[in-house]
Image (cartoon, grey):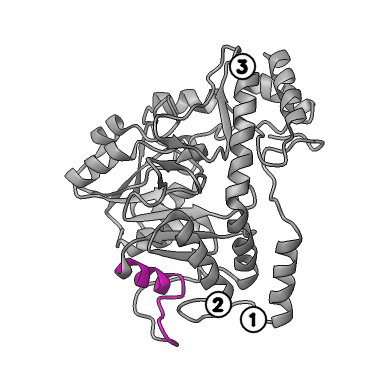
Amino acid sequence: MNTPNVKIPINVPLIGKDEINAVLTVLKEGNLTTADNLGGKNVQEFEKLASSFVKSKFAIAVNSGTSALQAALLALDIKKGDEVLLPSFSFVATANAVFSTGAKPIFVDILKENYTMDPTDLRKKITKKSKAVIPVHLYGNVAYIDQISELAKKHNLYIIEDAAQSLGSTLKGKHTGTFSDIGCYSLYPAKVITSGEGGFITTNSKKLCEKLLMIRNHGMVSGYDTRVFGLNLRLPEISAAIAKIQIKKLPKFLHQRRKNAKIFSELISDLSIKIPSERKNEKVNWYLFTIAIKNRNLVMKKLNKKGIGASAYYTMPIHKTPFYKTKIKLSTTEWAASTVLSIPIHPKVTSKNLQFIAKNLRQAL
């Protein structure tokens, strides 16, 4: 993907003195984690900040975005024999979480406009076995949630939003992850904020929140009283301490990403390539600035040689991977897999960097 001498990486964690001091405080205090139902002090403080930021009633911190999806599926009693509809154009974790419950992932095509789930194809794939749908807000783009919600309501399906890449993205002022039953986020180092490894789940249902708290902690409430099936999906206190600082910085990070996206869009506006744009009432977090071009691999190679960490997410859709290999045809997904290229625009990218990237992209084309 990237050459070893990359000077402008695709995404980097923005860690400062505040995060380092917060980690040192946890280490000095010695309370690294807890099996308490509500989690440790830093976990609880982070959850308050997270729910306040996305405006949901509850937030439940877990140890990864994958764990968030897995816990959400378990909380909704998704099991063997059930079908869960999801895009194939996503990171494999979306499908793996479904597979881990015994349910069957059913792959849906995407829209050319913003690489998110195609509601028309979704309608065709719904069967009597369908129990849930997982729209993925890919690259920070908001899925066509209104149409998806309409279909879900009609067919009595749960919606789990995979908002791993879209923390901070909104539609009509409402945050991704809060349009449905459950929202799942990732705090992996390459995301808009990080906790090292980590994630969180949002819901407005007290009942689901209580169940999710059990699921992340071996199904227990107090002591060894396992009441539901659960795993160890807890977020350690060190990670929560980092996340707590990061979420306070998130508005500043998002502002800089938006600024960089605007500058870069203007710099390449005359090129005959598909440039990402926001639809009406949509505000994207600009997690990945993704263009669509012919000769993608050649262009990517040329940019990488110049130290630009341009990357392709995802060159192999899930339904084409050796594990999930199916014969279904998803034409837009396959088109995207061979043409998308993501360009670095994270807060550490300077306007000088953006000019350098634009100049080299122009030459590569």
Q: Residue type at mark 2?
A: Gly
Residue 208 covered by magenta stretch: yes
Direction bottom: furthest residue: 223
Q: Which residues are magenta?
A: 207-224
Asked if 172 appears above or below 353 in the picture, the reply is below
Quadrant assignment, res 11? top right
Query: Is label 3 in contact with label 1 (beta carbons under 8 Å)?
Result: no
Query: How far apart in space, not on screen, are marks 3 and 2 (Cα)?
Result: 50 Å
What residue is rendered at 29% in x and 62% in y? 77
Asked if 288 appears above or below 267 in the picture, the reply is below
Q: Earlier in the sequence, mark 2 or mark 1?
A: 1
Which numbered circle lies on residue 40? Answer: 2
Residue 218 shows in this picture: yes
Residue 191 shows in this picture: no
Badge 1 local density, few (<14 within 10 Å), some, or many (20+)?
some
Q: Residue type at mark 3?
A: Asn
Tell me if 122 is positioned left or right of 166 in this view.
Answer: left
Query: How far apart in space, not on screen, are marks 2 and 1 (Cα)?
Result: 8 Å
Q: Secondary structure at mark 2?
A: loop
Q: Secondary structure at mark 3?
A: loop
Q: Nearer the viewer, residue 75 or 52?
A: 52
Q: Earlier in the sequence, mark 3 or mark 2?
A: 2
Q: Residue type at mark 1?
A: Asn
**Mark 3 highlights which residue?**
295
For the N terminus, the quadrant is top right
Direction right: furthest residue: 5
**Mark 1 highlights which residue?**
31
Quadrant assignment, res 204? bottom left
Q: Position of residue 40 (x, y in %)?
A: 55, 77
Q: Earlier in the sequence, mark 3 or mark 1?
A: 1
Q: Secondary structure at mark 1?
A: loop
For the C terminus, the quadrant is top right
